Amino acid sequence: MSSAVGQPSFLDEIRAHAERRPTAPAIRGRSGCLSYQELVERIGARARELRRSGIREGNRVAIIADNSPDYLLSAFAIWEAGGVLVTVYPSSGESDLAHCLDSSTPTLVLTEPRLIETVSAVVTGRGRVADINQPLTAEPACPRVADTTVAPDDLALICYTSGSTNRPKAVMHRHRGLLAAAHEFGRVWRVSSQDRTIVSLPMAWAFGLVTTSMTTLLAGGEVLPFARTRPEQIVDAISNERATFLAGVTTMFAKLVAHLRELDEERDFSSLRFCVSGGEPRNEHLFDEWRARTGRQVHDNLASSECFPVITSDPVEGSPPPRGSSGKVVPGAAMRVVAPDGSDVRPGDKGEALWRAPATFAGYWRDAEATAAALTADGWYRTQDLVRVDQDGYVYVEGRLSDMIIRGGSNVSPGEVESVLSEHPAVAEVAVVGPPDSVYGQAVTAVIVPADGLAAEPAELDRFCSSRLAGYKVPSAFLLVDGLPQNSTGKIDRRRVLTDLQEQGVGLASSRGDESA
């Protein structure tokens, strides 16, 4: 792939690192470490395979896999080949998988051995499926094709939200925006060639792919990918492999703190220079304990898949952000705080945050209506987050405009879970709400009125949901009641359900394990 004249691409910058420091470590996996020179060579080889297999400029290629060196190699090779990368969460249920693949219509889907059977069943008749870890087979009589040219404003990425509506939305980003965002993250967080970044956040999420992996590689640092958030592995990576940069969601830090409480020996965290959390509300009490045990503060990254970076803090300059703050607006972004009528609120007042950022999305793929709803007429992204800004410019999140549940950093639509449960014969009525949870931030909780004469057994309902929903969407608890409150229009009043649960003390502790965070 070559870039437009005068516009170096992400891959151009990686090649420059390979020329200056060919043996410097770039990505470390279970089988060893790839240097920058090896990374460039492997990307080129994979891109040639993609071209020989029939991928052309603008074709969409999906990746449905856990984090690994092969994930990054394949993602970057798709760009090298001129394709558009489509990322789908590997934890998605079959219904969400079908939705994502139906909407993006990829020419090729790269996945891992454990998912090939499931993905192949969904993809049938929609395209090809291949093992992300294996060489690609060339298409018969595939003609030789010229090198590709990718312009900064070409479409680079379609990533799916984790369910901010009844169906994941397909977020589009251009090459220019992704590169600018990674550079801005690198500047504000002081990422350098000395950094070794733990990436356990899914690379299907921009937080895992762009914010951490691309940012580190642009700075010439080393990426340490993990397929799962295993506290013992992360602690070992810091203590033994001298990792310097750790990003996660609040839930991940909760798991890490719980692990540290159980250890009989102290571990060495002296290499760790920067920690950041994003994707769900802060837990200051938890972060205080993390700091006490490791000596490192957890900074915040307030952004969305549609718009980033926006709000965070510099770990070096200035004093630490005030307790409860997400930081300040980064130099390359802008924020307005508006009232329901769209006018700017007075300084210090609460309102909805509207954002612009280096990577402001190019819209939702083939969904003009949703795109128009998400953007103002003059191009500001509507976050649906309620915020206030203090006199020093620090931003505080005060709540959300929607009833969305944020569990372990993933958005769960109550309506989607209710729709699934309502299909069970033993469920007459159901309301899904998100009371506070000490580990996951919010607990997906189903409050159910059983159908007459039928037993709504929690274990059976759990199995029913697990077969139809991604793991993080399955309720942590199933509570049986005689009736549900209604509002003035006759609809179930979720807010009253939630208030009743909180008054009863429900949801203050995690009741169900989760491997999705």
Image: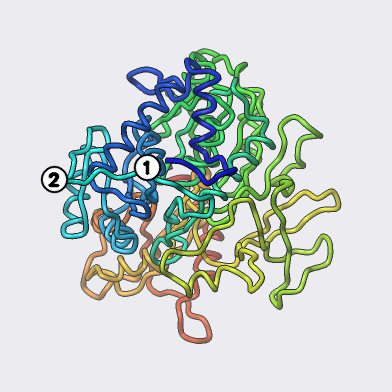
**Location of residue 397 (image quadrant):** bottom right
Please tell me which residue is depicted at 71% across the width and 52% down the height of the picture: 396
Residue 12: where, in percent of width, then height?
51, 35
The quarter of the rendered structure image containing the C terminus is top left
The residue tagged 1 is 147
Identify the colour scheme used.
rainbow
Q: Secondary structure at mark 1?
A: loop
Please tell me which residue is depicted at 22% across the width and 70% down the height of the picture: 425
Residue 140 marker: 2
**Amino acid at dot 1:** Asp
Q: Is residue 458 visible?
A: no
Residue 110 marker: none
Residue 400: where, in percent of width, then height?
60, 62
Residue 371: where, in percent of width, then height?
51, 69
Q: Is residue 447 left or right of residue 152?
A: left
Q: Is residue 478 visible?
A: yes
Residues at marks 2 and 1 touching, judged by CB atoms closer than 8 Å? no
Q: Is residue 92 above or below residue 31?
A: below
Bin the neighbour count of mark 1 within 10 Å (Cα to Cα): few under 14, some 14-19, many 20 and up: some
Q: Is residue 99 above or below residue 257?
A: below
The quarter of the rendered structure image containing the N terminus is top left
